[in-house]
Image (tube, rainbow, N blue to C red):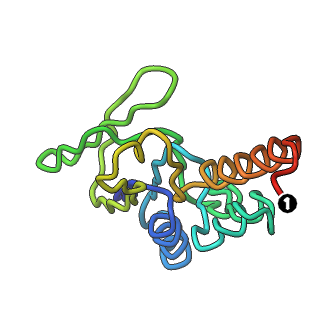
């Protein structure tokens, strides 16, 4: 049976696997998706999470919950040998291994950009992941709590 390997479980990876599940007949191909996170994030809603308007759980889609026929591996693809059609899979815990494939779809996504402004890489928080949106919200709330204890300013 042909093996289709999808690198990345974000928007493009999730929808690729979802469409393949709908279009492939049973036994036509084995679909595997590899991503270090077991969910896809609706990034356009991250500002609402940072603002506290919606909860973080409403912005993510669990891969296992929606991809019933797809094999899901929570790990990173750390190498692709396309000549031999093999990808190196590295989990956070345990030994890595090589995964053979017939077709590969690389949808690894993006990372937050930092501009060449001194200190931004060390002090700023990106807004590409649910964890970053929650960190921004928590920082804002902490700053408001600290500001509420300051003495009143001049009239």
Q: List the single residue furthest toward the bottom.
A: 23
Q: Is residue 1 visible?
A: no
Q: Position of residue 148 (x, y in %)?
A: 87, 47
Q: Is residue 73 left or right of residue 140?
A: left
Reply above or below: 81 against 94. Answer: below
Q: List the single residue furthest toward the top.
A: 94
The front one of 39 and 139 is 139
The front one of 115 and 42 is 115
Quadrant position of the N terminus in the picture: bottom left
Tell me the quarter of the picture where residue 84 sits.
top left
The front one of 56 and 90 is 56
Q: Is residue 51 left or right of residue 100?
A: right
Q: Position of residue 37 (x, y in %)?
A: 56, 46
- Which residue corresponds to the image point at 69% horizontal and 51% vertical from the top-left? 134
- Which residue corresponds to the image point at 32% horizontal and 60% vertical from the top-left? 106
- Which residue corresponds to the image point at 78% horizontal and 43% vertical from the top-left? 142
Reply above or below: 150 against 18. Answer: above
Quadrant position of the C terminus in the picture: bottom right
Residue at numbered disc 1: 155
Q: List the single residue furthest toward the left.
A: 83
- Which residue corresponds to the image point at 52% horizontal and 23% vertical from the top-left? 93
Q: Position of residue 49 (x, y in %)?
A: 72, 63
Q: Is residue 138 left or right of residue 126?
A: right
Q: Residues within 10 Å of mark 1 (few under 14, many from 20)?
A: few
């Amino acid at each position: 049976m042909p093996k289709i390997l999808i690198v990345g479980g974000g928007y493009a990876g999730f929808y690729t696997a979802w469409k393949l599940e709908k279009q492939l007949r049973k036994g036509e191909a084995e679909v595997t998706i590899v991503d270090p996170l077991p969910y896809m994030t609706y990034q356009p809603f991250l500002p609402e999470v940072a603002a506290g308007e919606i909860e973080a759980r409403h912005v993510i889609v669990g891969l296992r919950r929606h991809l019933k026929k797809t094999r899901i591996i929570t790990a990173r693809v750390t190498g692709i040998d396309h000549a031999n059609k093999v990808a190196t899979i590295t989990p956070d815990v345990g030994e890595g291994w090589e995964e053979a494939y017939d077709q590969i779809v690389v949808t690894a996504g993006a990372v937050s950009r930092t501009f060449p402004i001194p200190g931004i890489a060390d002090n700023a928080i990106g807004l590409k992941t649910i964890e970053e949106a929650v960190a921004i919200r928590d920082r804002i709330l902490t700053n408001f709590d600290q500001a509420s204890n300051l003495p009143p300013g001049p009239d």
